[in-house]
Image: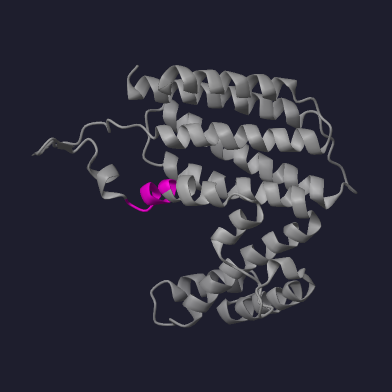
Amino acid sequence: MSQINEFEAHIDMLAEVIGQAHRLFDRFKIAPGSKNKKLFALITLNEIVRKCESVVAMAKAGSWAGIVVVARSAFESYADLLNCLSFGDDYAEYMVWMSLKQQRSLFQTIGDNPDSKYHQSIDTLLKTKGGGVKKVAAETNQQLDELAKNLPDIFKDKNGDVIGRGQFRFELAGKVDEYNVLYRRLSASAHGSVSDMLDGIMVGDDIHWPPAKPTEPPLVAADCLCAILLESCGRIAKAYKKPAAPLKALARKRDKLRQELWG
């Protein structure tokens, strides 16, 4: 079987898992008063599902270039989901802190470069919402400080500072090996891998121009997404005592597919 056929088989498998994820959603009722842990876990699972749906759409359209970028992002959401289930509301607060930290970095960069051609447009946009770069940056700093005071020590280093490294999310989730091998591989492609850029352009020692369609589909990304979506659904089903038999059947089907393709 060619690499393209293998890729298409994994995409079909991923579409099946997505369908099962939606059936799992139907078994939950989220209403005012729902516990934050359940709410954040389901919201994060939905984020993974959305990203997987985007990958299926890109694959069906024959547009592979953005798949590894989306898969890498889904991997981060996967770590967040596992941590939501383990640490509950505390991790939800940590997710808010991380989001605000990213905003602060942006506003500080803009504020430190008033001559940037982007500074005035962003400052004007924020002022229409009652802010401005300086005001929003100050408010964000205040929110970060308040959140940091209430976060448990598990999210802080020995100096009492909240840990902001992306790798830390995977360490908390017990997924260091997955981070070191799979996530870093996806990151290498997502950040402009030269070999990926030349696929469909360099044929042997010759340049093919206009560029042809890439010859190597992102098979690893498709397989990773199947794995993390299956595990994510399984963890939620187990945590909230929902039927898991269909998920286990899909996991066996995926194992069989991998055995047929790769031995």
In-front residue for pair 173/149: 173
Residue furthest to the right in view is 33
Residue 260's x, y, as percent?
A: 45, 17
**Which residue shows up at 59% across the image and 68% down it?**
164
Horizontal arrangement in the rendering, residue 197 relative to residue 223 (left or right): left
What residue appears at the point 21 percent right and 32 percent down from the top-left corner? 212
Magenta stretch? 185-192
Q: Main secondary structure of the magenta part?
A: helix
The vertical placement of 95 against 116, above or below, is above
Residue sitting at x 39%, y 77%:
116
Most foreground residue, 256 or 137: 256
- Looking at the rendering, in which quadrant would you find the N terminus? top left
Q: Residue visible at 39% across and 49% down? A: 190
Location of residue 240 (image quadrant): top right
- Which color scheme is applied? one colour
x and y, in percent, of residue 213 in the image: 26, 31
Left or right of residue 155: residue 262: left
The number of numbered badges drawn on the structure is: 0
Which residue is most to the left? 206
Tell me: 221 left or right of 233: left
Q: Quadrant of residue 7?
A: top left
Q: Quadrant of residue 140?
A: bottom right
Q: Position of residue 9 (x, y in %)?
A: 46, 20
Was residue 147 drawn as part of the magenta stretch in this picture? Answer: no
- Picture coordinates of residue 31, whole percent (x, y): 87, 42
Quadrant (top left/top right/bottom left/bottom right) for the C terminus: top left
* Residue 186 colored in magenta in the image: yes
